């Protein structure tokens, strides 16, 4: 299996990355080089195996928990917005999304 | 006998002298800040804040004077710039976060500060911890106008390893007695190996990931890097512990005193030696150094047991599917809205995202986002991501099988010593292949460490990797400490340091 330049364009769009033509070409070569080493993995018989997400679940049950739904953090709007690119009256500014 | 300089003291000895008030925390902090400023050419540090450092040191001195000393009171440390900090910019080595000020400290940062450690500054690393050579940082180190690679203190024409390259270089050059690092696929162990220092990654889930800028959430773990196992044990004891409200993957395993069994005998310790770690890809000089280290263990009374980790090679594709998949998801938060870089010129919202991310991310990060987005996309998820997670279970099971016949596993950290700057930067896959010996333990979430086991080509350090079973950190540190009591590799210093 080899990726095509259409695949690169589709993935870049999914990933919200603008790639220049030269960059796309380089990406295509590099990704195909990478997927060559992935081929071996696809042939492995994994029938009946559960995927392992939390590695310690290999030996014991690991329950993902939810904490109680209680406000525990103080309001720090200013501190939280100090590194935002565009803020007005405490709101994040983005390009117009509703006509 | 001359008094050793402050930067030659171990963390353990420095802590003792601080508590006996033979040296003050302020003096120690000033000493190390002076060394950092006098040696910018390594590119190890990206940020200092002298005022904040000295304020922490004064507070430590006050506690010591009041008889309320804490375990690490006054010990200067530095953090990999992947941990967010209130008092220093937090960049993750990325243009995306240049100048970013976090409103909070990472849990690891808080825990070390609570133990009394004094933060000297932030350390250079590969962008979002993606890299094996620290050549992927987009942040100019202190004393530089432009981004510059971190250099290996043993040979400035070589890489320090990555992604915790600044961390390893700083310890080797004695710019800090101990530092933090993070390890996703080997990012503590490999730079520790390349720079001849000691580093440990605990069992996945023991150190909180809260405030560690996320790369691959099911793999990322924090850990200390220092010159000896004894010093790593002191820091690791402060770092580990449950953080149930802030990290959903944090395990409910109590904090532990990792120093308590350092001196236990290793007589009868069964060391598993995986055949797959000694195949044709291993450079002869590394092999010779690792074999020498294993012989040393036999002299100490340990037994070498041949074992097999049959899926070692498969761990490369498995890791490089899982880690980029998680990275593509984690890095979707960098959209130019709430924090970080935003492109200057753009059309609509989607265009803003695309241009912002194109400008803010470096090449390696983009590659991994692309791989991740692809393997998670409709029609490919089962064949790649899910398949990788299933083989991950096989790899973890292989380790459990191996631990039936051994207590710890030993082998090389990396196939070669540190390579020359630029040597592999044009070939991403070559970098990935060099991670082969650290990836299996990462995928299984096992604790792993690197300690200087000898020297190889060009007089460069060679790391010995020790891998333990889950929650076996004490045993690893004990085995490493006994080795360091019997050898002097960890005491050797680069020329001119």
Image (cartoon, coloured by chain):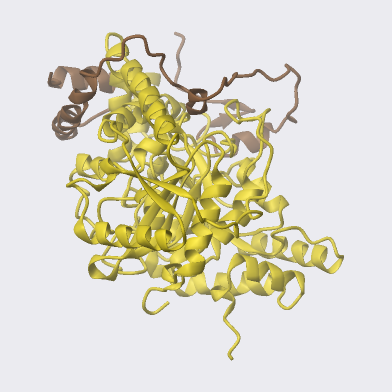
Chain colours: A brown, B yellow
Residue B200, image x and y in percent? 49, 50
Residue B408 image-quadrant placement: top left
Residue found farthest to the right: B66
Q: Quadrant of the N terminus of chain A?
A: top left
Q: Residue at x 55, y 26 (%)?
A: A92
Residue B48 visible to an observer of this rendering: no
Residue B478, image x and y in percent? 55, 55
On screen, residue B105 versus residue B420, left or right, reads right
B113 up-or-down from B222: above or below: below
B237 up-or-down from B446: above or below: below
Q: Residue at x 47, y 30 (%)?
A: B217
Q: Residue at x 71, y 57 (%)?
A: B116
Residue B206, image x and y in percent? 59, 37
- B401 or B171, nearer to the observer: B401
Q: How many marks?
A: 0
Q: Quadrant of the C terminus of chain A?
A: top left
On screen, residue B431 versus residue A94, left or right, reads left
On screen, residue B26 versus residue B8, left or right, reads right
Q: Residue at x 27, y 63 (%)?
A: B158
- B142 or B452, nearer to the observer: B452
B418 up-or-down from A48: above or below: below
- B137 or B393, nearer to the observer: B393
Residue B306 visible to an observer of this rendering: yes
Residue B109, image x and y in percent? 62, 47
A81 up-or-down from B269: above or below: above
- B435 or A97, nearer to the observer: B435
């Amino acid at each position: 299996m080899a990726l095509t330049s259409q695949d690169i364009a589709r993935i870049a769009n999914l990933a919200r990355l603008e790639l220049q033509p030269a960059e796309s070409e380089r990406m295509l070569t590099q990704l195909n080089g990478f997927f060559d080493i992935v081929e071996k993995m696809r042939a492995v018989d994994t029938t009946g195996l559960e995927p392992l997400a939390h590695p310690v679940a290999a030996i014991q049950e690991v329950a993902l928990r939810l904490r109680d739904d209680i406000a525990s953090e103080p309001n720090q709007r200013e501190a939280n917005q100090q590194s935002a690119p565009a803020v007005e009256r405490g709101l994040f500014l983005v390009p117009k999304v509703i006509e | 006998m001359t008094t050793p300089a402050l930067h030659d003291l171990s963390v353990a000895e420095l802590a003792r002298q601080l508590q006996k008030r033979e040296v003050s925390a302020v003096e120690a902090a000033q000493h190390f800040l002076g060394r950092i400023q006098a040696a910018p050419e390594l590119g190890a540090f990206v940020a200092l804040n002298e005022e904040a450092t000295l304020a922490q040191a004064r507070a430590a001195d006050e506690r010591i004077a009041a008889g309320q000393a804490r375990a690490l009171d006054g010990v200067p440390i530095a953090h990999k710039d992947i941990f967010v900090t209130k008092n220093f910019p937090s960049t993750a080595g990325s243009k995306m976060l240049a100048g970013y000020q976090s409103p909070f400290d990472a849990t690891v940062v808080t825990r070390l500060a609570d133990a009394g450690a004094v933060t000297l500054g932030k350390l250079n690393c590969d962008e979002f911890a993606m890299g094996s050579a620290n050549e992927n940082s987009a942040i100019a180190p202190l004393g530089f106008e432009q981004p510059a690679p971190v250099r290996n203190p043993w040979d400035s024409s070589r890489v320090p390893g990555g992604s915790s390259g600044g961390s390893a270089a700083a310890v080797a050059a004695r710019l800090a007695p101990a530092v933090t690092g993070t390890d996703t696929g080997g990012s503590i162990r490999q730079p520790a190996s390349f720079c001849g220092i000691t580093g440990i990654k605990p069992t996945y889930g023991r150190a909180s990931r809260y405030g560690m800028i996320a790369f691959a959430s099911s793999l990322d773990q924090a850990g200390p890097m220092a010159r000896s196992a004894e010093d790593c044990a002191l820091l690791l004891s402060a770092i580990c512990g449950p953080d149930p409200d802030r990290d959903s993957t944090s395990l409910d395993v109590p904090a532990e005193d990792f120093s308590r069994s350092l001196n236990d005998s290793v007589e009868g310790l069964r060391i598993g030696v995986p055949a797959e770690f000694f195949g044709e890809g291993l450079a002869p000089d590394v092999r010779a150094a690792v074999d020498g280290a294993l012989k040393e263990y036999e002299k100490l009374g340990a037994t070498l047991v041949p074992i097999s980790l049959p899926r070692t090679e498969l761990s490369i594709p498995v890791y490089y599917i899982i880690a980029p998949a998680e990275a593509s998801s984690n890095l979707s938060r960098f959209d130019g809205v709430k924090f970080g870089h935003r492109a200057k010129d753009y059309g609509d919202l989607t265009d803003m995202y695309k241009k912002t991310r194109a400008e803010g991310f470096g090449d390696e990060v983009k590659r991994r986002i692309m791989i991740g987005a692809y393997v998670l996309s409709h029609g490919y998820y089962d064949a790649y991501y899910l398949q990788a997670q299933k083989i991950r279970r096989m790899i973890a099971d292989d380790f459990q099988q191996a631990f039936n016949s051994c207590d710890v596993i030993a082998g090389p950290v990396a196939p070669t010593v540190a390579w020359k700057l630029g040597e592999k930067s044009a070939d991403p896959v070559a970098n990935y292949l060099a991670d082969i010996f650290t990836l299996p333990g990462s995928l299984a979430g096992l604790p792993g460490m690197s300690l200087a086991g000898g020297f190889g080509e060009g007089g460069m350090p060679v790391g010995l990797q020790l891998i333990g079973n889950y929650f076996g950190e004490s045993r690893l540190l004990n085995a490493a400490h006994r080795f360091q009591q019997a050898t002097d590799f960890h005491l050797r210093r680069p020329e001119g340091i």
